[in-house]
């Protein structure tokens, strides 16, 4: 449909909708947002809580990526795709979705602990906001501590000039989180290297065979890619990778 015809039909369509028999009786909802002076301390507290919740929702993607198992999983899956030689298969949406649901599966015990011991008591007004946040951070900190190397933790403590803590509960979050991320990146790259080795061997064998046969004009990837896919399917690669990744978080 031509743009001129669309411009002509749009006002006509709106006019017909407004002049239909039931259009005048159909209520149109309205939204009214006002900013006024607070009349009580409770209103101020409610406003601050709303601002805090909006801030947490804004930072939710970063919190999900940097304080959970998501980083390791998505990097290993990306390495797996590169090792196979399939540039866009599986697509990024599938890899991220799979990594996200695996993260939900792995982090379920931690989030259940947070919900039962922090969020639910806070809703029932048995805990203050500061006490609920402190109690919610304990299981998350315990999870990250299991996969944080002491070397990385000491690095950020020296940079931040934080005194040596007596226990892991005394380590602040702004020090623990980057140390945890570095450890996850190293672990993901180690797993990615191990995944690359068998497929690299297949590429080298195929290239050597093609060179010995004098087929130098044939790209090795045309022969090695079907072989790598067949090998991956025969060993049930996705089951092995996903199972190993999941079990790596349950030492």
Image (spheres, rainbow, N blue to C red):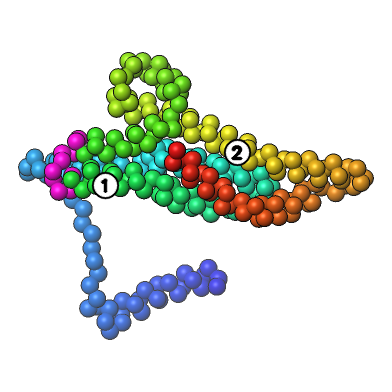
In the figure, is residue 179 to the left or right of 172? Answer: right
Q: Which residue is mark 2?
A: 192
Q: Residue furthest left?
A: 40
Where residue 13 sits in the image (x, y, percent)? 40, 76
Would you place residue 82 above or below residue 12 in this image?
above
Q: Which residue is mark 1?
A: 115
Magenta stretch contains residue 125? yes
- Quadrant position of the C terminus in the picture: top left
Spatial CA distance of label 1 from label 2 is: 34 Å
Would you place residue 148 above or below residue 136 in this image?
above
The residue lying at 45 percent from left, 26 percent from top is 149
Magenta stretch contains residue 177? no
Q: Is disc 2 surrounded by few (<14), some (14 to 19) or many (20+) residues within 10 Å? A: many
Q: Residue furthest bottom?
A: 21
Where residue 192 sits in the image (x, y, percent)? 60, 38
Q: Nearer the viewer, residue 42 or 19?
A: 42
- Quadrant position of the N terminus in the picture: bottom right
The residue lying at 32 percent from left, 15 percent from top is 163
Q: Is residue 37 visible?
A: no
Q: Nearer the viewer, residue 95 or 8?
A: 95
- Sooner in the amino-acid sequence: mark 1 or mark 2: 1
Would you place residue 136 above or below residue 180 in this image?
below
Q: Secondary structure at mark 1?
A: helix
The residue stretch that appears in magenta: 122-131
User: Tags 1 and 2 in contact by the CB under 8 Å rule?
Assistant: no
Where residue 226 sits in the image (x, y, percent)? 74, 54
In the figure, is residue 181 to the left or right of 208? Answer: left
The residue lying at 53 percent from left, 44 percent from top is 244
């Amino acid at each position: 449909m031509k743009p001129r015809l669309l411009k002509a039909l749009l006002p006509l369509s709106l006019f017909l909708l407004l002049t239909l028999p039931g259009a005048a009786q159909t209520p149109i909802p309205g939204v009214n947002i006002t900013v006024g002076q607070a009349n009580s301390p409770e209103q101020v507290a409610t406003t601050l809580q709303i601002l805090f919740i909006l801030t947490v929702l804004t930072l939710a993607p970063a919190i999900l990526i940097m304080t959970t198992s998501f980083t390791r999983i998505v990097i290993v899956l990306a390495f797996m795709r590169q090792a196979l030689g399939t540039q866009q298969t599986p697509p990024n949406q599938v890899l991220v979705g799979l990594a996200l649901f695996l993260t939900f599966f792995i982090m379920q015990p931690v989030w259940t602990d947070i919900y039962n011991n922090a969020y639910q008591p806070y809703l029932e007004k048995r805990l203050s906001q500061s006490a609920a946040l402190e109690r919610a951070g304990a299981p998350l900190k315990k999870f990250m501590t299991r996969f944080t190397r002491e070397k990385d933790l000491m690095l950020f403590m020296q940079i931040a000039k934080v005194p040596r803590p007596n226990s892991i509960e005394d380590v602040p979050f702004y020090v623990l989180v980057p140390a945890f991320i570095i450890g996850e990146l190293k672990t993901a790259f180690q797993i990615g290297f191990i995944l690359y080795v068998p497929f690299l061997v297949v590429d080298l064998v195929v290239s050597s065979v093609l060179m010995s046969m004098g087929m130098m004009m044939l790209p090795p990837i045309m022969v090695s890619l079907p072989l790598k896919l067949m090998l991956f399917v025969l060993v049930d690669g996705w089951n092995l990778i996903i199972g190993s990744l999941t079990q790596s978080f349950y030492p």
